């Protein structure tokens, strides 16, 4: 897969930013209703009004306070999120709103599926490097993980993806952040007792805070070590 536009339906959900409008941009992994952890990470980042924080989606579900996380992100003009697969489940009525009111759901529906600037793309799940970008659907970019024939295990998409853009993503629960030349994975299992991780795009570093607690149980073996094996 090479760079360029996504299919027209996805391009309509693509928000393009001008990085020159901001002194710095941070990208933050899956929050999953963990408002107090998100607040502690934002305190650590301490973004100025001229800095932007972009969330990779899955602000909601599984954790204790989905409405609180939505209120937090809506309350600050320098916070922005894309829609993850868990936002989509609520929007489509496949999962209960978990305390979100109709205005909150309208706001979730208004979020872009993709955010990009310069040679950077933020989406929730991933892409298939073997398929043209124009063939990717909304479900693809929100849910893609494994490229294995049975959809489970290695190779994962980021192990085969070679650009040209650098893609920041969440969705796949990792034991530690993955930082590669062309992909950065940031879901470090906050709701499962792991950590909430941000990437500082200007200084090329990750910043994490430990989760308050595990609100959902997940076996340690289900936290993927993204560096364990790339011999695919």
Image (spheres, grey):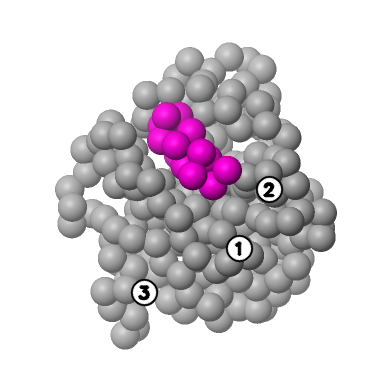
* For marks 2 and 1 on the same chain, the one whose residue lies earlier in the sequence: 2
Image spot of residue 62 (x, y percent): 36, 31
Q: Which residue is mark 1?
A: 201
Element under label 3? loop
User: Magenta span has 181?
Assistant: no
Q: Which residue is mark 2?
A: 52
Question: Horizontal placement of 1 versus 171: left or right?
Answer: right
Element under label 2? strand
C-alpha distance separating marks 3 and 2? 33 Å
User: Magenta span has 45?
Assistant: yes
Q: Quadrant of residue 130?
A: bottom right
**Quarter of the image with the N terminus in it:** bottom right
* For marks 3 and 1 on the same chain, the one whose residue lies earlier in the sequence: 3
Name the residue: 23% across, 54% down: 222
Question: Horizontal placement of 219 versus 68: left or right?
Answer: left
The numbered mark at residue 155 is: 3
């Amino acid at each position: 897969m090479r760079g360029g536009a996504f299919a027209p339906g996805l391009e309509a959900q693509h928000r393009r930013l001008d990085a020159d409008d901001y002194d710095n941009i941070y990208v933050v992994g899956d929050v999953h209703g963990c408002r107090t952890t998100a607040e502690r990470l934002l305190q650590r980042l301490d973004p100025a009004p001229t800095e932007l924080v972009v969330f990779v989606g899955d602000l909601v579900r599984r954790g204790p306070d989905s409405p609180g996380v939505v209120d937090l992100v809506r309350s600050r003009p320098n916070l922005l999120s894309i829609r993850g697969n868990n936002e989509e489940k609520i929007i489509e009525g496949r999962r209960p709103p978990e305390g979100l009111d109709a205005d909150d759901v309208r706001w979730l529906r208004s979020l872009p599926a993709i955010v990009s600037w310069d040679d950077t793309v933020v989406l929730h799940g991933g892409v298939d490097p073997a398929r043209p970008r124009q063939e990717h659907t909304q479900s693809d970019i929100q849910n893609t993980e494994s490229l294995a024939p049975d959809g489970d295990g290695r190779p994962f998409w980021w192990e085969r993806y070679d650009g040209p853009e650098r893609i920041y993503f969440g969705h796949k629960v990792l034991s530690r952040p993955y930082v590669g030349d062309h992909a950065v994975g940031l879901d470090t299992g906050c709701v499962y007792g792991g950590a909430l991780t941000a990437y500082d795009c200007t200084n090329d570093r990750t910043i994490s805070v430990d989760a308050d607690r595990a609100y959902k149980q997940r076996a340690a073996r289900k936290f993927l070590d993204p560096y364990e094996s790339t011999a695919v």
